[in-house]
């Protein structure tokens, strides 16, 4: 079953679909014909089209999330292209990713988001199945799964760096840091007042006293400025409208408070608004093909969308492990993405993304494994081995 949303343009029609059931393929009663397409080809991880599709796949993964931070592409770890005759290509991409400092609700493109210092990095790997049909201008994330871990503090060798802390209020300092930094922001805000929605990340450090670095979502407060000091911190049904980074550093004689907030652009978007002003120039599709229209649509109708995958968070790997064991290293970021369990492949019905009555199927395979191309992994943006999955 597919639920689709078709975005039309004079030059472009970009189809954005959510795949509800990918488990269909292996178990289908339809008898499988022998595979009519050759095996997938390993692709170079620095090839411009591979980089383009990888960036777009990650963008669609980010658009799928309601929680957490925008993931940025650090490098392409592995790439396979399965050419499907006249139907186009199915890419199997393994992406090494890093959390950026943007919250996913900001709906910012990962290329517009800042990175994080090593000591607070969260990194990992995503696998994505991405379908490309250049002549029909279809660029479609079929499925993904990701696994993330914080950087290992043992390997970081920085005992004085801020260290992550739980986000609950078991430590009074966390709520204090959030409310005091938000009070500063509200005091400087001309009219609108904001209240705390949810603390999303905390780290602590000892400077000349306790220091707290907090990141939190805010929503519009029902109170106006003159009421601000007495405004209760009540739960509300309203959605978060912004995201703040605050720090509260205390010493014996002085308190340093700093805060920056980013108020999200309105997320109100109707499927009819084709020419959203939020669109900006996407990178160019290799091969002289004009770039597809930027889509911000996946966030527009969350109720209709079914997740195409999930992001799994695991704890840091802080224990010693045998460095020579390649197999063990592979398991550090377990990511399962199998569109079929049949080793010979299966069929995935994609008829609903095409206009017209004809039946269109893709041949899907279990996610290809090594040996991969000699040109993989590709060059990394953040080259520290601390944030590169093995
Ligand atoms: C895209 O899909 C259509 C419909 O299946 C097909 O006719 C066309 O050849 C495909 N184009 C490419 C470049 O794969
Ligand atoms: C609020 O802002 C005013 C000036 O904009 C400043 O004088 C005052 O100290 C601020 N109060 C707090 C609690 O930050
Ligand atoms: C703030 O709201 C209260 C109660 O709604 C009202 O009495 C007061 O005049 C308002 N103040 C301003 C500055 O709008
Ligand atoms: C994605 O991962 C989850 C568990 O982590 C798994 O249940 C699911 O089958 C995976 N998706 C695919 C398409 O393999
Ligand atoms: C990756 O490709 C770019 C541009 O095509 C090139 O400048 C760069 O040297 C390549 N990097 C590696 C590591 O191959």
Image: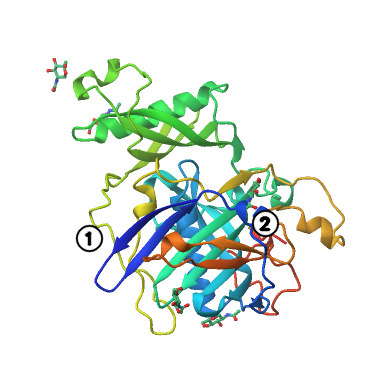
Query: Is the residue 68 above or below the residue 349 in the image?
Result: above
> Residue 117 location in percent, x, y?
55, 53
Q: How is the image coloured?
A: rainbow
CB under 8 Å between callouts 2 and 1? no
Q: Nearer the viewer, mark 2 or mark 1?
A: 2
| Residue matched to label 2 | 26
Give the side of residue 87 with respect to residue 334, left or right.
Answer: left
Q: Is mark 1 within 8 Å of ligand 1?
A: no
Q: Which mark is residue 372?
A: none
Displayed quadrant of residue 345: bottom right
Q: Residues within 10 Å of mark 2 (few under 14, many from 20)?
A: many
Which residue is rendered at x = 45% and y = 24% of the image? 176
> Residue 111 location in percent, x, y?
43, 62
For this rendering, which residue is in front, 317 or 267?
Answer: 267
For this rendering, which residue is in front, 153 or 166?
Answer: 166
Q: Quadrant of ligand 2?
A: top left
> Residue 365 location in percent, x, y?
67, 65
Query: Is the residue 263 above or below the residue 135 in the image?
Result: above
Q: Secondary structure at mark 2?
A: helix
Report, in whole angstroms, how far the alpha carbon at label 2 lies from the one at label 1: 40 Å
Q: Residues within 10 Å of mark 1 (few under 14, many from 20)?
A: few
Quadrant where the C terminus is found in the figure: bottom right
Which residue is rendered at x = 49% and y = 67% of the image? 360
Which residue is rendered at x = 28% and y = 74% of the image? 11
| Residue matched to label 1 | 275
> Residue 24 location in percent, x, y?
61, 52
Which residue is rendered at x = 31% and y = 34% of the image? 185
Q: How many marks?
A: 2
Give the side of residue 326 with respect to residue 281, left or right.
Answer: right
Q: Residue furthest bottom?
A: 288
User: Can residue 242 be seen?
Assistant: yes
For this rendering, which residue is in front, 45 or 258?
Answer: 45
């Amino acid at each position: 079953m597919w639920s689709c949303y078709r975005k039309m343009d004079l030059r472009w029609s970009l189809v954005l679909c959510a795949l509800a059931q990918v488990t269909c393929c292996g178990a289908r009663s339809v008898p499988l014909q022998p595979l009519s397409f050759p095996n997938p080809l390993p692709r170079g991880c620095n090839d411009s089209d591979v980089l383009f599709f990888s960036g777009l796949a990650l963008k669609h993964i980010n658009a799928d999330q309601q929680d957490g931070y925008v993931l940025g592409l650090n490098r392409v770890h592995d790439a396979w292209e399965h050419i499907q005759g006249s139907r186009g290509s199915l890419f199997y991409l393994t992406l090494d990713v890093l959390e950026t400092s943007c919250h996913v609700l900001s709906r910012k493109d990962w290329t517009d988001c800042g990175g994080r210092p090593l000591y607070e990095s969260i990194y990992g790997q995503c696998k994505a199945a991405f379908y490309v049909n250049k002549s029909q201008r279809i660029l479609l994330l079929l499925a993904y799964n990701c696994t993330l871990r914080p950087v290992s503090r043992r390997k970081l060798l920085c005992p004085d760096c801020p260290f992550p802390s739980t986000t609950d209020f078991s430590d009074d300092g966390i709520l204090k840091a959030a409310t005091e930094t938000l009070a500063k922001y509200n005091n400087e805000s001309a009219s609108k007042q904001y209240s705390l929605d949810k603390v999303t990340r905390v780290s602590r450090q000892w400077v000349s006293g306790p220091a707290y670095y907090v990141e939190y979502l805010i929503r519009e407060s029902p109170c106006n400025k003159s009421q601000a000091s007495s405004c209760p911190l009540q739960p509300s049904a309203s959605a978060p409208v912004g995201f703040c980074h605050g720090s509260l550093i205390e010493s014996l004689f002085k308190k340093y408070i700093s805060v920056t907030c980013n108020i999200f652009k309105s997320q109100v978007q109707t499927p009819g608004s084709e020419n959203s002003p939020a669109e900006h120039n996407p990178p160019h599709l290799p091969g002289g093909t004009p770039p597809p229209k930027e889509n911000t649509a996946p966030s527009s109708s969350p109720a209709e969308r079914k997740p195409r995958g999930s992001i799994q968070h695991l704890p840091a790997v802080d224990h010693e492990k045998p460095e020579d064991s390649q197999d063990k290293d592979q398991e550090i970021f377990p990511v399962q993405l199998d569109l079929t369990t049949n080793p010979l492949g299966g069929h995935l019905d994609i008829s609903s993304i095409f206009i017209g009555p004809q039946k269109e199927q893709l041949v899907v395979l279990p996610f290809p494994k090594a040996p991969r191309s000699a040109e993989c992994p590709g060059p990394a943006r953040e080259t520290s081995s601390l944030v590169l999955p093995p």
